Amino acid sequence: QVQLVESGGGLVQPGGSLRLSCTASRSIISFETMGWYRQLPGKQREPVAIFTSDGSTNYADSVKGRFTIARDNAKNTMYLQMNSLKPEDTAVYYCYADLEGRFRTYEYWGQGTQVTVSS
């Protein structure tokens, strides 16, 4: 069973920065895709930044130029650097990863970390 553990959330003022971390219980090199999602109050979970299976990165339009996804394979850890934060970035942020099995795709989620942007 794969475990993903997030950290780094908190309260920050508008314009501030936070860095989220997601540490996996196994090598992250093995994952097909890995990334960050968020769930705003009363909304569905949405992708924020993703490492795709072909090695590229995709960002939601709302975070382009402000957020950066990164990974450290040696530490089995993925990061989300969030700069120029806005109140509308307030959400629970989730780490996601998936593995291609022989007959199905296995999906894993972290427990979520709250990010609140408020003055």
Image (cartoon, rainbow, N blue to C red):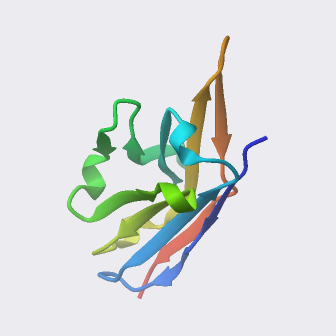
Q: Position of residue 116 (x, y in %)?
A: 50, 75
Left or right: where does residue 20 sit relative to residue 13? right
Instruction: Check the image and report above or below for 53 versus 25.
Output: above
Left or right: where does residue 69 sit relative to residue 90? left
Question: What is the residue that sits farthest to the front in this orientation?
Answer: 74
Q: Position of residue 67 (x, y in %)?
A: 31, 62
> Can residue 35 be spotted in the picture?
yes
Instruction: Check the image and report above or below for 95 versus 19.
Output: above
Look at the image and tell me in which quarter the C terminus lies.
bottom left
Q: How many marks do you count on the picture? A: 0
Question: What is the residue that sits farthest to the right in this orientation?
Answer: 1
Instruction: Check the image and report above or below for 22 versus 49.
Output: below
Question: What is the residue that sits farthest to the top in this orientation?
Answer: 103
Q: Position of residue 83 (x, y in %)?
A: 31, 73
Look at the image and tell me in which quarter the N terminus lies.
top right
Q: Residue at x 53, y 47 (%)?
A: 43
Please name whichever residue, 64 or 71, is drawn nearer the observer in this view of the structure: 71
Please name whichever residue, 15 or 65, is drawn nearer the observer in this view of the structure: 65
> Can residue 41 be spotted in the picture?
no
Q: Position of residue 106 (x, y in %)?
A: 66, 28
Q: Residue at x 34, y 73 (%)?
A: 85
Quadrant for residue 76, please give it. Answer: bottom right
Question: What is the residue that sits farthest to the left in this orientation?
Answer: 65
Instruction: Check the image and report above or below for 19 versus 80.
Output: below
Please name whichever residue, 77 or 45, is drawn nearer the observer in this view of the structure: 77
Left or right: where does residue 46 sit relative to residue 8? left
